[in-house]
Image: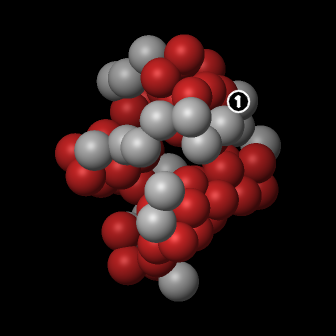
Amino acid sequence: MEIETIKIIENLRKTRISMKMSLLGLANLAEISHSHLYYIESKKVIPSIDVVIKLAKALNTSLPTLME
């Protein structure tokens, strides 16, 4: 897994936790399965760009912010 991908995943998780949002809550908002989000956050699966964009929108953030 590339360093950029790991950074995005870690920032997604940090943002979700800082918003006090559960995995299930974010998965529902992003319209993806709870298990898929779990595997993404566990770094067992590399998310597609479409999924990352859905997650960013659900978290009210942008892709560039997640890449910082």
Asked if residue 7 is positioned above or below residue 48 in the image, the reply reads below
Displayed quadrant of residue 44: top right
Figure label count: 1
User: Which amino acid is tagged 1?
Assistant: Ser
Observer-nearest of 31 and 42: 42
Q: Quadrant of residue 24?
A: top right
Instruction: Answer yes or no: is residue 6 visible.
Output: yes
What is the x, y in percent for residue 23? 64, 28
Residue 33 horizontal side relative to residue 20, left or right: left
Query: What residue is shown at x 25% (from left), y 52% (from top)?
Result: 49
- Residue at disc 1, secondary structure: loop
Q: Is residue 36 left or right of residue 43?
A: left
Residue at x 71% of width, y 58% of height: 14
**How is the model colour-coded?**
secondary structure
User: Quadrant of the rendered structure where residue 7 is?
Assistant: bottom right
Q: Report x, y in % for residue 40.
A: 53, 37
Query: Where does label 1 land, which residue?
Result: 22
Asked if one can make out residue 8 in the rendered structure from this viewpoint, the answer is no
The residue furthest left is 50
Where residue 43 appears, as percent x and y from the top left, is 60, 42
- Nearest to the observer: residue 62 or residue 67: 67
Q: Residue at x 54, y 16 (%)?
A: 35
Q: Determine the residue positioned at 53% across, 72% down.
A: 3
In the image, 45: left or right of 43? left
Q: Position of residue 54 (x, y in %)?
A: 32, 44
User: From this viewpoint, which residue is outermost toward the bottom?
Assistant: 68
Q: Label 1 crowding class (10 Å Cα cut-off): few <14, some 14-19, many 20+?
A: few
